[in-house]
Image (tube, rainbow, N blue to C red):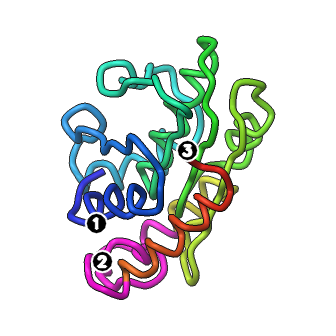
Amino acid sequence: MEGGYIGEWVETLQNAGIGNVQAVDPALWSVGKTNDVLRVPFEKSVRDDEAAPLSRQFSTEGEQFNLFGYSYGSLQAAQAAMDYADRGGKVDHLILLGSPIQQEFLDQHRAHPNIGSVFVQDLPGDPVYAGMDQQDMFKAALELAGKETYDGHRYYNDTGPKAQRRKAAYAEFLYRNRVR
């Protein structure tokens, strides 16, 4: 939910031809980097009862309405997509990158009539993956604690040229798959 790489994602997605890309306001979506990480195994891997603050930040007008999330942000995007779709809104594409989403919650998105395609991208060498259970989330959190390497779960976090090429390749993949 925070970090310099987020601005690079916005620019990279726009450069690939994806329009109206907006980053979240961390004040609305995050309780701080460390607290966000600590919350994942306990409450954010499945649907919760809190409404996502979607309407307070984004316009859903335009050619498509897509939600993109990375790591903890993917859980927030999944929650927002489900809230919006349950209220009759159409989510064209939900993109979950390095997501610790549990399988049941992921299946609910794939089956929802108001959610179009769901792109899931697990990262090379990452202990975090879509469909993991709560026990594996605890193990992954312990494994990742204190590591700052830009491989595995942090594959796209870096802001250098190598990470920029990684982001550009993924943005081009999304564009080829009709994300606009």
Q: Position of residue 75 (x, y in %)?
A: 50, 44
Q: Indicate the amino acid at tag 2.
A: Asp
Residue at image point 68% right, 39% down: 105
Q: Is residue 129 left or right of residue 53?
A: right
Q: Neighbour class for label 3 at 10 Å: few (<14), some, many (≥20)?
A: many
Residue beneath disc 3: 45
Q: Is residue 2 left or right of residue 17?
A: left
Secondary structure at numbered mark 3 = loop
Circles 3, 1 touching at the beta carbon (< 8 Å): no
Q: Neighbour class for label 2 at 10 Å: few (<14), some, many (≥20)?
A: many
Q: Nearer the viewer, residue 81 or 40?
A: 81
Distance in Å between CA atoms under marks 2 and 1: 6 Å
Q: Earlier in the sequence, mark 3 or mark 2?
A: 3
Residue beneath disc 2: 158
Q: Position of residue 66 (x, y in %)?
A: 53, 39
Total number of numbered labels? 3
Q: Indicate the amino acid at tag 1.
A: Tyr
Residue beneath disc 1: 5
**Region rendered in magenta:** 140-162
Q: Quadrant of residue 20?
A: top left
Circles 2, 1 touching at the beta carbon (< 8 Å): yes
Q: Earlier in the sequence, mark 3 or mark 1?
A: 1
Q: Position of residue 24 (x, y in %)?
A: 30, 40
Secondary structure at numbered mark 1 = helix
Circles 3, 2 touching at the beta carbon (< 8 Å): no
Distance in Å between CA atoms under marks 3 and 2: 24 Å
